[in-house]
Image: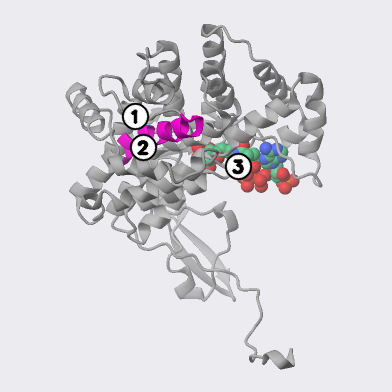
Amino acid sequence: MTDKTASFGIDGSDRTYPVMEGSVGPDVVDIRKFYGDTGLFTYDPGFTSTASCQSAITFIDGDKGILLHRGYPIDQLAEQSTFMEVAYLLLHGDLPNQAELSEFDYTISRHTMLHEQLATFYRGFRRDAHPMAIMCGVVGALSAFYHDSTDITDPQQRLIASHRLIAKMPTIAAMAHKYSVGQPFLYPDNSLSYTGNFLRMTFGVPAEPYEVNPIIENAMRRIFILHADHEQNASTSTVRLAGSSGANPFACIAAGIACLWGPAHGGANEAALNMLREIGNVKRIPEYIARAKDKNDPFRLMGFGHRVYKNYDPRAKVMQQTADEVLKELNISDPVLDVAKELEHIALHDEYFVEKKLYPNVDFYSGVILNAIGFPTEMFTALFALARTVGWVAQWNEMISDPEQKIGRPRQLYVGATARDYVPLDQR
Ligand code: SDX
C-alpha cells in the first residue's frame, strides 16, 4: 500500500480512496467501499479498467510488449525451459532445481492415465463432435471420478487435483482426436516427455512403434509454453469466478475450457487458419483488409488485436520464428504462411491497424505450425486448453489461498421496466 490516494468529487463532496501499488505496472484505486460510501456503482463492461484481484503469477505490459511469468521473460522460457519447468514455476513461484523438477516430472507422469470408465464417455459423442465439446464434457466429468481431490479447503487435495488436471489434459485431448478419426486410444508412455507423450498418444497407433520427432517435440514444447498463462484473460477470469463459489477444481477448469472456445479468445487460432485458407493467396488480401475496416462488416482479422497488447504480442514473435523453423526443418512449404506474412506486413502499414494498435497475437501463426505438424484445425483450441491448464490451475490455487478472496458478484446498471402490476392473460 502507498500513501497515494484518489479523490472523486460526488454531489459537491470529495470521496477519497487509497491507491495500491504493485511491484510493477499500473497502481489501482481501492474502491471496495465506494458503493457503501456513495450509493453508486462503477461501470466497466468488459472490465477494461478493472483489476479483479492481486496476482504474482504473470505480468503483461501491453504498450511495451512484455510478458513475464513470475518475473521471467516469455522468450527466455520458450527458448530454455521445458513445459513442466514452466508449469512448476507458475504453480510454485520459482524455477525448480533438478531434484524439484525430477520429482514434479515423476508426480505428473504418475497421473497421466484416465479412470478406465471415462473412455466410455467418449463413445457417447458423435464422431464429428468438436474436440472442445468433448474437452468441456470429459474435464467436467472428472469431478465424478476423483472425489478424493474435490475438497478445496484441503491443501493436499488441491495439490492432487492440480497434478491430476495438468497430467490428464494431454491424455484427454489426444483421446478426443483419436475418437474423431476412429482410431483406438493409446495409453500414456511415461518414459516420454510430457510433450512427447502427447504426440505419441495423438499420432501413434497400436500397430507400430512411434518415434517422437525431436523437431516437432521442440516446437510443441515452445507452443505449450507460449500458451501457458496470460494474466486475467477471459477464461482465467472464468476459472477464478467459478472457483470463488467453492466449486471443485475440475468444474472450474471445465468452465475455463468453455470460455476459451469462443472465437474472440482461444477459438481464434482455429478461426485464423480458416481465414488464411479462405484468403488463399496474397492477391486477395486487400479485399479482406477492406472488410476488416468496414464498420458494417462483422468480419475481423482473426489472430489480430488484443485487449492488452497495443504493441506486438511477444508470443506472436516467437510463434512466427517457430513457424519458419518447423516448416523449413520438415521441408514443408505452406502457401498459407506466405499469406500470413504478407497480411501482417500490409496490416502493419495500414493506418487503420496502426491507429487502432492492432498487431498479430498469439493465435495468428500458431495454426500454420499445428497444421504443418498434422493436427486437424478443430484440435487447435483443444491444444490451447491443454497448455493453458497449467496457468488456470496456478491462478485457481492463488485465488483460493488469497485471504481477500470472496465470491465474485458484480452489480449492474438496471435499464429494464420499473415495478408494474401483473396483467391477467385475458386482458393482454
Ligand atoms: C487471445 O486476454 C488475453 O490475454 C487473451 C489471450 C490469452 O493468452 O489468454 O491473449 C488469447 O484470446 C488472443 C485474442 C484472440 N482473438 C482474436 O484474434 C479475434 C480477433 N480480435 C478481436 O476480436 C479483438 O481484437 C479482441 C477480442 C482480441 C480484443 O477486443 P477488444 O479489446 O474488446 O477491442 P475492440 O473489440 O473494442 O477493438 C478495438 C477496435 C474496434 O474498432 P472501433 O470500434 O474502436 O472502431 O479495433 C477494432 C474494433 O473493431 N478491431 C479489429 C480487430 N480487433 C479489434 N478490427 C479488425 N480486425 C481485428 N482483429
Quarter of the figure with residue 242: bottom left
Residue 101 coordinates in the image, percent (x, y): 23, 26
User: In this view of the protein, can residue 67 be seen by the observer?
Assistant: no
Residue type, numbered disc 3: Pro
Q: Going from the N terminus, do you reach mark 2 or mark 3 first?
A: 3
CA gap between label 2 and label 1 equals: 8 Å
Residue 153 coordinates in the image, percent (x, y): 22, 57
Density class for disc 3 (Cα within 10 Å; few <14, some 14-19, many ≥20) is some
Label 3 or label 1, whichever lies nearer to me, is 3
The residue pinned by badge 3 equals 263
Span shown in magenta? 165-182
The residue pinned by badge 2 equals 390
Residue 266 coordinates in the image, percent (x, y): 54, 39
Depicted 405 relative to depicted 314: above or below: below
Density class for disc 2 (Cα within 10 Å; few <14, some 14-19, many ≥20) is many
CA gap between label 3 and label 1 equals: 26 Å
The residue pinned by badge 1 equals 86
Density class for disc 1 (Cα within 10 Å; few <14, some 14-19, many ≥20) is many
